[in-house]
Amino acid sequence: MMTFELSTIVLVVVAYVLVTFGIATLTNRGWLPDSFINHPVTYILSLGVFASTWAYYGVVDLAYQYGYGALTYYIGIVALFLFAPVALTPIAQLVQRFKIPSVADLLVFRYHSQLVGSVVTLCMMAAVMPLVAMQIQAVAESLSILTNYTPEKSSHFDFEKMFALGYCLLLLVFGLLFGASREKQRGLVMALAFESLIKILAITAVGLFAVFQVFGSLDGIDQWLAQNPDQQKLLYTALSDNSTHTLLLVFIATAVAMPHLFQSSVVDVPVARSMRFASWAFPLFLFCMAAPILPILWAGFALDVPLPVQYYTLGVPFVSEQPGLTMLAFIGGLSAATGAIISITMAGTVMVLNHWLLPMSRLGQKRDLRRRIVWLRRTTMGGILAAAYLFYLITGGDHRLMELALTTFVAMLQFLPAIIAVTYWSRANRFGLLAGMCAGATVWFWCLLLPVMFEVSQVSLPFWGMVALGIDAWNSIALVSLALNIGLFVLVSMNTEQNAEEQFSASLCTEAEIAQPVRVILDVHSCDEIKERLSRSLGATLAEIQVNKAAEELGYSFSERRPYSLRRIRNRLETNLSSMMGRSVASEIIDRHLPYRLPSQAGNTDINLMESRLHRYRDRLTGMAAELDSLRLYHRNTIYELPMAVCSLGSDLEVITWNRSMEELTSIQSGDVAGAHLSDLSSPWRELIIDFTDSEERHLHGQLVKVDGKERFFSLHKSPLHTPKAIGEEDGQVILIEEITELKLLEQELTHSERLASIGRLSAGVAHEIGNPVTGIACLAQNLKYDSDAPEVLETAEQILSQTHRISSIVHSLVTFSHSGSHNPRQCSAVEVQSFVSEAIALLSLQKDDVQVTYQSFVPAHLRVMGDTQKLIQVFINLLSNARDASEDGDTVVIEAEAEAGEVAISVSDQGSGIDPDHIDQIIEPFFTTKEPGKGTGLGLAMVYSIIDEHDGSIRVESPLDKQSQTGTRFIITLPEGVEPSPE
């Protein structure tokens, strides 16, 4: 029989570990493409940690002992992944959502107890020690097989154990480099995928060699089985008892609860991308691992391999003198052991660190946790490998691999009830879990673990006699411990109460039940304040990194101030810190620095949180739950699309609902205000709504609010909201805001119309009363004109007659304007523009005001328009007086005119302050004025507009004339050009 040099084997082991190291390094440095690293096939290969040396070596022995029953190992795992959408996806979604790093953290999250985490970690570490020791033993014994080394019986610490120690130290170095920091997990995943690829290639190659070289073909296997019916009979004998069913249950529990399998299949995978792919691809991977098992077993018997059955995978090519294939088979076993040890150590480190070391060392009260956690993680990894090696030494390294593996797998049954209850039984509590798990683990420890370690097969008990223990009684021990676990778990849970925190956690985990979360109060007002508080424990750098990361993951900016958003950032911080230091320590730090405070009154439901959770769960709701959710969305959309502005507030004035009309009214988007406090709103809405919520009035009408410089009117209405479970207790209020600006304008116009109607009724009396004295004055002036020949007297009499005529015309115009369209047919003739402009200037020049301006007329003498002279004089008196009132002392008012296309355009320009753009459309409205009270009636421009419209003309305004200084106004009047009638 051939042998290998020890130095060759050592070089192969070191070279293999260095290649794995190189792959991890290339991945972490970004030298491998992301498409390759993130490919689902890489994820499937990383799941190959399921296939440790147990699947590579031990299952061959299991097939010898249980025949087809050995397939239960693969059937259990395959069934779990085939039904992954039901079995794994709910837990995976929970783990991904809250970044739960381990089985122990999952149970702590669900049962809200640090004691649960400590007990689960203790039981888990005790359970995996036989499995890790099995990997070490398999590598050491395979080395002895290849080198034909036989230890001396008198040697207490032979070379095989020395090699096992060196192998453990080599793996420790790898783990310290790539497992101490979570930032290097991508490299670790790629290394595990590479190891899975090697072992599946190796076992497939050995299987093909067995079929086509040992037996010649598949028909050769049939012939050999026909010649050896005892081997064929072995395939069925183990199916006659119930051990096969127990094996199936054990392997399902192993796939769910084993810490490194949980890490690979649930924690380190994006659920949406890979879980559906894994549901068929990973069973295919396991099929490739299982297919060679029976051919290898039969080939070993056919070749009379002088090795234990568990090492037939290595022995078949070794006995056949195939050095290349033998070395590949050895590397495959080395790969299986290396991947399992590293992944189990990493997963165990997380659990021990989170639930033993950090809580006991109170690192949550110290600064700069990051460095301390890294060193603690490294120390823990070394401790776990040392404990596994010590277990290997205690057991002597001469147990069958199947014994060690089954010892661990039976222990996994103790975690199965608690894990299933996470998502499927909300009534379970921590008391039931601790009672059941402790009872089941105690039975396993005394009846299976200790007997395996010290090779005890039976014990004599009073009244019982001899009782079988150890691996020979594994089936009974598994069933008894599981039954005791489940019984106490259910019984204690049903007879004890959950606390409020546990009920809340149960509602988060159980998708069929969504409780009404209370809208708690977080006494911080900004991300800066959160960072400042956390820096007391995390240090300034780590606190800033974590706060920025949490805000970025939620899509918030660092300047976020909304209470609801700050609560979400706080919860995300707790989730992120949990993945780094465990749920218990993270909760302690967050609760100490960012404590929640319950509201002063009951019933404050966090509607925003409920909405986000229902939105996330919507695709998973069925039956009546889906119908209720559709009804909820219907009512929500009804409120959102209402053509009236509606918002709802919590009792703490936190904005709950903000519909589309409210968005249009306030120009504040719902996404920017939902979850914010009213005090965070911009003016004037903050003052308007807060004042209304504080008032005892249910309705406020005609509230004047200045929005963007414009005056707007609103009516406000409110009604209290009551909690669904406690009628009479207010949980906030709903506010309706109705804009009535147009209604107010209509009311003002109606008032104006009434005032005009009153003026119309008074105008007749006024005209009569004024007309009599004016007629008398006109008669006296006429007499004066005939009684004197003096030019000065005649000129004065003429001016008196002209002004009395103007008074009569003004009174008549006032009456006709107030009677909306009852003007008499106008007396139109061709009028020189220069004449009525000059007369208006002359009349205004008679007034001695504080502001003196210069009127410059550039009106050509020949221009004529069709119109009434007196009314046009009135137009320009109003325009020129307004220009004067808007000007500074010493300014110039310019009048220009030009004819074009049968029309004459006359402009009046000033150098005043200009007209506010918001007022341009209002200046022609009756009674609108920007002058101080007592200095304007608001009728001047209205009269101008009425007269120009009566003359079939138009008027427009340009303001400001100077865009830089924002000064100057120009009124441009267009009138039909005047033409003298031709003599007949």
Image (cartoon, rainbow, N blue to C red):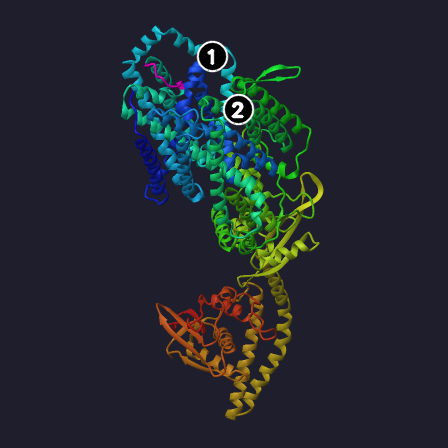
In the rendered structure, which disc, 2 or 1, sits on the residue that comes first in sequence? Answer: 1
Q: Amino acid at mark 2?
A: Phe
Q: Is residue 768 above or below residue 420?
A: below
Q: Which residues are magenta?
A: 303-309
Q: Are marks 2 and 1 in contact (CB under 8 Å)?
A: no
Q: Amino acid at mark 1?
A: Ala
- Residue 200 in percent (x, y) is at 35, 26
Closer to us: 625 or 666 = 625
State whether residue 470 appears in this view: yes
Residue 4 is tagged as none
Residue at the bottom extreme, as displayed:
790
For label 1, the residue is: 238
Q: Quadrant of residue 432?
A: top right
Point 55% across, 74% down: residue: 809
Residue 483 in which image quadrant: top right
Give the left or right position of residue 695, taking residue 593 as reference: right
* Residue 427 showing in the rendered view: no
Q: Nearer the viewer, residue 445 or 226?
A: 445
Magenta highlight: main SS = loop
Q: Residue at x 42, y 10 (%)?
A: 234
Asked if the stretch drawn in magenta spans residue 851, the answer is no
Q: Nearer the viewer, residue 899 or 914?
A: 914
Q: Position of residue 876 (x, y in %)?
A: 48, 75
Report, in whole angstroms, how far the alpha carbon at label 2 lies from the one at label 1. Answer: 27 Å
Looking at the rendered image, the quarter that the C terminus falls into is bottom left
In the rendered structure, find residue 454 and report the number of the disc placed on it.
Answer: 2
